[in-house]
Amino acid sequence: MTDGDGAAEHPTGLVLTTAAGARFHFDPGALCLELLTTGGPGPYARFEVLHRPSDLTDWLTRSRLRLPAGTVRITEGQLGAARTLRDALWRLAADRAHGRPGDPADRAALNRAAAHPPLVPRIAPDGTAAAPLPADGAQLVSTLARDAIALLTGPHADRIRECRAHDCRLLFVDTSRPGRRRWCSMERCGNRNKVRALRARRDTDPTAPVDPIAPVDPIAPVAPVDPVQVTVAVSAPRHRTFTS
């Protein structure tokens, strides 16, 4: 499982933007789970953003790998392999979060992808991490698959969670010490839950104090059943993707 080094300089995770324009930070705790923000199987297919090889290289710049655009050569076939891996991981991670056994076919898909050589780490002359070049899409997919296997078979496998918000399906690894993380992000779903609870208290008890730090209207409109539509962005660049 990849957590990344140098978090102070390069915080891990992604900045997501809802369809209503609200931005929030989401760190799923693993590289492979970051890939799930690009689309997925079944009802998530309509949020697909990996249409061209350049879309995957664009995601690489935003992922915790922080690879510059154009440093990994990706073919159409390798892009398809990345989507196949992502969809299998979506199902396996969601099954693990809900205590379901998972489909052996999806585990086989991870094993096939991991069988290829992964990205090779390199060190720069100044002692810092260097981009793993030369590299191609098959190496990237293998690296993602190996990260997924390490997560699903490692000590944090039982800490894979789905956000507790009724309209959010984001998956993450709960690495908190007490293991009580409930929300994809306190900026987003955690805050929405807090505001709902405050409003419920005021409805039942008009004398209940108002929390001065709660925003007036932080709840952006979202689809009642489908994943929250979001955009993945880091700094200025943006592209459309999903969540729930």
Image: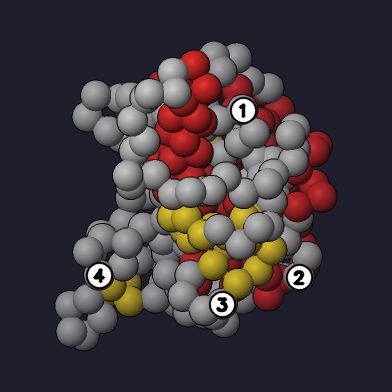
Which residue lies at the image location 21% right of the left edge and 85% below the top edge? 125
Residue 140 placed where, x, y %? 54, 61
Judging by the rendered image, the residue that carries numbered circle 1 is 166
Tell me the tag on residue 237.
3
Marks 4 and 3: CB-CB under 8 Å?
A: no
As drawn, the label of residue 32 is: none
At a point 65% along the width and 40% down the height, the residue shown is: 244
1 or 2: mark nearer the eye: 1
From the image, tell me which residue sits under label 4: 9
Above/below status of 110 relative to 152: below
Q: How far apart in space, not on screen, are marks 3 and 1 (Cα)?
A: 29 Å
Q: Decide if residue 14 is in sight here.
A: yes
Where is residue 77? Give x, y as percent. 76, 62
Q: Residues within 10 Å of mark 1 (few under 14, many from 20)?
A: few
At label 1, the amino acid type is His
Q: Nearer the viewer, mark 3 or mark 2?
A: 3
Residues at discs 4 and 1 in contact (Cβ within 8 Å): no
Nearer mark to the viewer, of 4 and 1: 1
Residue 78 sits above or below residue 182 on the image: below
Q: Name which of mark 3 and mark 2 comes first in the sequence.
A: 2
